[in-house]
Image (tube, grey):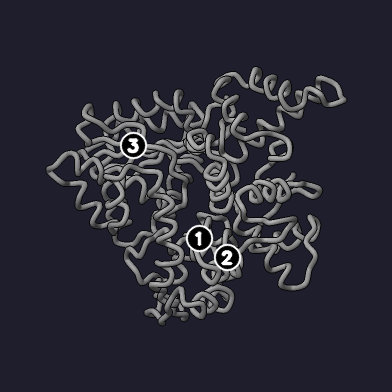
């Protein structure tokens, strides 16, 4: 089975073939009609190509697929949030291409590609696609053999000023768009995939309940990212390099019952907060409302306390922050808040998350600060999955999940492809005390769904 590319497909979506401001306008003009969009792209950019009309449409389709891969439009040619941002900037080329370049660096592995090229050049290597594919593979980044993904990316980054000519990098512009120094970038780029996954988990935890047992972080990193760790060599392979780089401190923990080994206790340092957590938070906070941002900086226990506020607006914001924090623990991607307003008094919050790990899935989160979740609460969420195209419903309650609600959820899972995850007040208290257990809770719910959905032989 072919391995999915970690770099975006960009064939026929490059500044050498299309005009981005005009292409954005075409997307607006043909929103919701992929066929007419492709025909307009064909007529403008590929109509004079000496080939069949079928192939000209294929080139136009590749342009559309490139825009999708770069996160600018969806499959129905509606601009994404990022696409709308670019559309608003289309009159100013400098700002437009700077925004696209920053998006590529931060969200599409562009920073890893650029740093890899700098490493190759520092080692005296001539950069070409086959060599770049090998070097990126050693950093856990894959693109197809024969693919031109990095070349298309380089052309857009050249428009943003990151590349000068060919593969020569303007390091000042690179650091400016990325927002971190060369030293900070090198500190992160040199780590292996397991080390980066370990750091990302620590950053997602945000310091809540630190210090952590080293094997707990390993467990959550494995569950979240599918990274295989060698338990026996974890200190040598992961912990010591991160300690020596100044991102964590280590001390021996208490002896585990029935086991001779004492796991290290891991504490994030201020350097980890400054160089990994804070940039992640700042990038993430740009996606949410200003009134929610202070809650995202609070420890999980403090957010839970705010959920019980007598001020319904504060309680509603805390609920949204709770949902976001729980899903960020397993590194799901925040999409939007679906509902919060006068109709709910801020007491109920629906949040949408997505992930593309292994396969695409959309997670629909409903938080309830009631004593019990009812069948009707679950039924409402099930009804909305048709419009939201969700695969997973997560019910988070500060109270209990009623027996009728659980029976109904089981029935829905048995009869459909939906998975319904139930997290109650007791689970939340466990997570507050030890955030790592979110992995165990989600695994428990996954096993429950698998039992219900067992195929009859």
Identify the residue position indicated by label 3 in the image: 366
Which part of the image, by quadrant, shows the N terminus? top right
Mark 1–mark 3 Cα distance, whole angstroms, equals 25 Å
Q: Nearer the viewer, residue 202 or 84?
A: 84
Identify the residue position indicated by label 1 in the image: 221
Residue at x-position 30% and y-position 39%:
367
Instruction: Determine whether 47 is above or below 420 in the image.
Output: above
The image quadrant of residue 408 is: top left
Residue at x-position 21% and y-position 29%:
342
Return the x and y of residue 312 as percentages of the image width and height. 17, 39
How busy is the neighbourhood of tag 3: few (under 14 within 10 Å), some, or many (20 plus)? Answer: many
Mark 2–mark 3 Cα distance, whole angstroms, equals 32 Å
Label 1: which secondary element = helix
Residue at x-position 63% and y-position 61%:
170
Tell me whether circle 1 and circle 2 mark residues in contact (CB < 8 Å).
yes
How busy is the neighbourhood of tag 1: few (under 14 within 10 Å), some, or many (20 plus)? Answer: many
Return the x and y of residue 129 as percentages of the image width and height. 79, 55
Return the x and y of residue 225 as percentages of the image width and height. 54, 55
Viewed as shown, does residue 423 lie left or right of 3? left
Viewed as shown, does residue 197 lie left or right of 278? right
Instruction: Determine whether 235 is above or below 432 in the image.
Output: below
Return the x and y of residue 424 as percentages of the image width and height. 30, 45
Looking at the image, tell me whether mark 1 or mark 3 is earlier in sequence order.
Answer: 1
Identify the residue position indicated by label 2 in the image: 194
Residue 391 appears anywhere in the view:
no
Which part of the image, by quadrant, shows the C terminus? top right
Looking at the image, tell me whether mark 1 or mark 2 is earlier in sequence order.
Answer: 2
Label 2: which secondary element = helix
Marking on residue 168: none
Looking at the image, tell me whether mark 2 or mark 3 is earlier in sequence order.
Answer: 2
């Amino acid at each position: 089975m072919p391995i999915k590319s970690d770099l975006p497909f960009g064939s026929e979506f490059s500044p050498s073939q299309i005009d981005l401001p005009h292409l954005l306008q075409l997307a607006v003009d043909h929103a919701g009609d992929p066929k007419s969009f492709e025909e307009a792209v064909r007529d403008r950019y590929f109509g004079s190509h000496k080939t069949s009309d079928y192939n000209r449409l294929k080139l136009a389709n590749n342009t559309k697929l490139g825009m999708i891969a770069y996160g600018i439009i969806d499959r129905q040619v509606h601009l994404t949030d990022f696409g709308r941002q670019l559309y608003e900037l289309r009159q100013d080329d400098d700002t437009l291409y700077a925004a696209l370049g920053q998006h590529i660096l931060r969200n599409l592995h562009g920073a890893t590609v650029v740093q890899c090229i700098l490493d190759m050049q520092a080692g005296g290597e001539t950069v070409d696609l086959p060599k770049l594919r090998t070097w990126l593979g050693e950093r856990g980044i894959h693109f197809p053999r024969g693919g031109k993904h990095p070349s298309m990316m380089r052309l857009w980054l050249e428009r943003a000023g990151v590349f000068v000519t060919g593969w020569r990098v303007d390091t000042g512009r690179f650091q400016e768009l990325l927002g971190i120094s060369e030293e900070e970038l090198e500190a992160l780029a040199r780590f292996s995939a397991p080390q980066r996954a370990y750091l990302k988990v620590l950053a997602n935890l945000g310091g809540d309940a630190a210090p952590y047992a080293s094997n707990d972080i390993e467990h959550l990193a494995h569950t979240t990212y599918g990274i295989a760790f060698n338990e026996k060599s974890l200190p040598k392979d992961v912990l010591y390099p991160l300690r020596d780089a100044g991102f964590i401190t280590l001390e021996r923990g208490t002896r585990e019952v029935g086991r001779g080994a004492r796991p290290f206790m891991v504490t994030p340092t201020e350097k980890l907060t400054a160089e990994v957590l804070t940039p992640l938070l700042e990038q993430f906070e740009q996606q949410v409302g200003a009134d929610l941002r202070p809650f995202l900086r609070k420890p999980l226990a403090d957010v839970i306390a705010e959920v019980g506020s007598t001020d319904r607006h504060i309680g509603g914001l805390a609920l949204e922050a709770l949902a976001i924090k729980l899903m960020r623990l397993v590194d799901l991607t925040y999409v939007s808040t679906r509902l919060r307003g006068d109709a709910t008094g801020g007491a109920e919050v629906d949040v949408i998350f997505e992930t593309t790990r292994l396969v695409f899935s959309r997670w629909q989160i409903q938080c309830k600060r009631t004593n019990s979740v009812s069948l009707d609460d679950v039924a409402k969420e099930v009804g909305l999955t048709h419009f939201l195209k969700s695969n997973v419903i997560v019910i988070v309650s500060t109270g209990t999940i009623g027996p009728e609600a659980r029976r109904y959820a089981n029935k829905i899972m048995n009869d459909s492809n939906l998975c319904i995850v139930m997290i109650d007040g007791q689970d939340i208290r466990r997570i507050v005390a030890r955030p790592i257990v979110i992995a165990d809770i989600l695994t428990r719910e996954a096993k429950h769904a698998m039992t219900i959905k067992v195929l009859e032989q």
